[in-house]
Amino acid sequence: MAELLETYACVPSTERGRGILISGDPKSDSIIYCNGRGVIIRRLGAPMDVTIYGEHSHQTTVARFSPNGEWVASADISGVVRIWGRYGDRALKNEFRVLSGRIDDLQWSPDCQRIVASGDGKGKSFVRAFMWDSGTNVGEFDGHSKRVLSCDFKPTRPFRIVTCGEDFILNFYEGPPFKFKHSHRDHSNFINCVRYSPDGTKFITVSSDKKGIIFDGKSGNKIGELSMEEGHKGSIYAVSWSPNSKQVLTVSADKTAKVWDILDNGNGKLNCTLACPISGGVEDMQVGCLWHGDYLVTVSLGGMICVFLASDPKKHPTPFSGHLKSINSLACLFQSGQRTILTTSYDGVIVRWIPGIGFGGKIHRKERTQIKCFSATEGEILTSGFDNKVHRLPLNDSCCGEAEPVDVGFQPNNLHFILKCPDLALVSTDSGIILLQNTKVVSSVNLGYAATASAVSPDGSEAIVGSQDGKLHIYAIEGDILKEEAVLEKHRGAITVIQYSPDASMFASADANREAVVWDRASQEVKLKNMLYHSARINCLAWSPDSRMVATGSLDTCVIVYEVDKPASNRLTIKGTHMGGVYGLAFCDENSIVSAGEDACARVWRLVQQ
């Protein structure tokens, strides 16, 4: 059996020019946000304490805890709201199709009986309020002509609902049943967010016109504005109230987050500007925020989450980040005597994780090119994207040195360092093999068949190339010449991955027809067969450091661990490892394995022998 030790979570999905919504659990220090089809719950005090809900069939957009903390309502781009249990097996209470398009915001009523949702109705209704248990409508929401970006429920009686969006209009509704009362046209651009204060006496709107306006909570009349003199210089994307309803936190495209004091006359005066870390690009734009207890949380366009303390906002924040997009490769290595896990995603992000600590920073490259293939040693990395270039870069703690890219003539599909000859690297493409010495091409071989995977032995004396027809071609490497020695046939699908064991006595191969095979290197005979327990293509495999176990990761979301000296039926299966499939796998040590996948998360598992 396998026990989950740590989860290195993804960060909230962001979109340029739009705010994002994160919300907090009223009973704990947990926050909730969305990425891909997943809804992620994580504790601010322990960022590796992560729960992921993956039952939506479309990309999720917003999720909120109920006021009693027992339920979660989450919505997606198809207009569906799912209501599910926060604890236990996260049982589904109800599922409703609320709008005909994307849902951008939702909010619970304070008695947990009603939910209001807003978004894009594709020309029909843009807002809907309904009973949480039956889905029955509880009002008519006229008055909007375009997508409604935000909505909120007054947290005290008498109940009110406020909505705002791309038509520059703020609408105010009384109920239940809710009816249109009046509207305001005080903003001159998209109104990105509206939020009631916890005591229900006021609500605030923020807009792309750089203004924040405060209204009376009961009547809906305008009572004040945030000061423009010391205000934001860009669009304001999100706002959040302090628990005592006397301050607000705002974030903006001008890359700043500001705390405002709300005065008795209803106007807002700047209290302080938070020092968010700056890397120098558009990814520093602040797009989401949350005031949760003593925590001030900000989220940047690049996915950096910064946690400030409300009691000491001048103190340097606790930053943590991760991947925005799905992880496509993974490497486990030692850096400065410390075990380190590197993960990459196709958008060019390389993240370093430290077991027991979590996020260890991003690896910065001068040119942030896309990453399709990746290989790493203690002091160097090899990357290639969707062009013909291979980048070989020296690796320091948090950044890469500079080096000229090597044009290999074709798009690479595998990259390998030759461990015993560190200046040599093997690159395979769809039609051939290229040997690199530092940043020079020393040998290029046209294979004459469609190559889909490759591997090179640790001593650099042998290479294996897998083909589209399922054959394994073994080559001897003599200097810079490749000489074909044997062809092995066992697979019935295109080879997807090949890897030598650490002691170099065996190698394992896997194919798109869900089969893996362990071969004895000396005799070139099958050592472990019938490894046919996946239900979809195998994407990755890994050997344990003692060469005793081999693990496979598949599109079917499972990881299966086999012991080489036992029949394949004595396997250990980790089900539902990553929503959408497993794309990276490595052993940390003899008893723990790290996996990564489509859900943009990485997980460390301890293998417990039965």
Image (cartoon, rainbow, N blue to C red):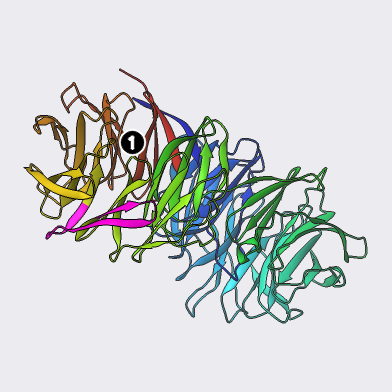
How many residues crowd around disc 1 within 10 Å: few (fewer than 14), some, or many (20 or more)? Answer: few
In the image, 282 versus 308, the foreground residue is 282
Residue 162, position as x, y percentages in the image = 68, 67
Residue 387, position as x, y percentages in the image = 35, 66
Secondary structure of residue under mark 1: loop
Q: In the rendered image, which residue does mark 1 sit on?
A: 420
Left/right placement of residue 552 relative to residue 584 reads left
In the image, 580 versus 160, the foreground residue is 580
Q: Is residue 90 shown above or below 610?
A: below
Q: Quadrant of residue 524?
A: top left
Kindly identify the residue that appears in the image at 49 percent across and 48 percent down. Answer: 394
Residue 553, position as x, y percentages in the image = 29, 41
Region of the chain picked out in magenta, as a range? 434-452
In the image, 378 versus 200, the foreground residue is 378
Kindly identify the residue that appears in the image at 54 percent across and 73 percent down. Answer: 126
Residue 6, position as x, y percentages in the image = 49, 33
Going by the numbered disc 1, the residue's amino acid type is Lys
Kindly identify the residue that appears in the image at 52 percent across and 75 percent down. Answer: 125
In the image, 526 versus 532, the foreground residue is 526
Quarter of the figure with the C terminus = top left
Q: Is residue 3 shown above or below 492?
A: above
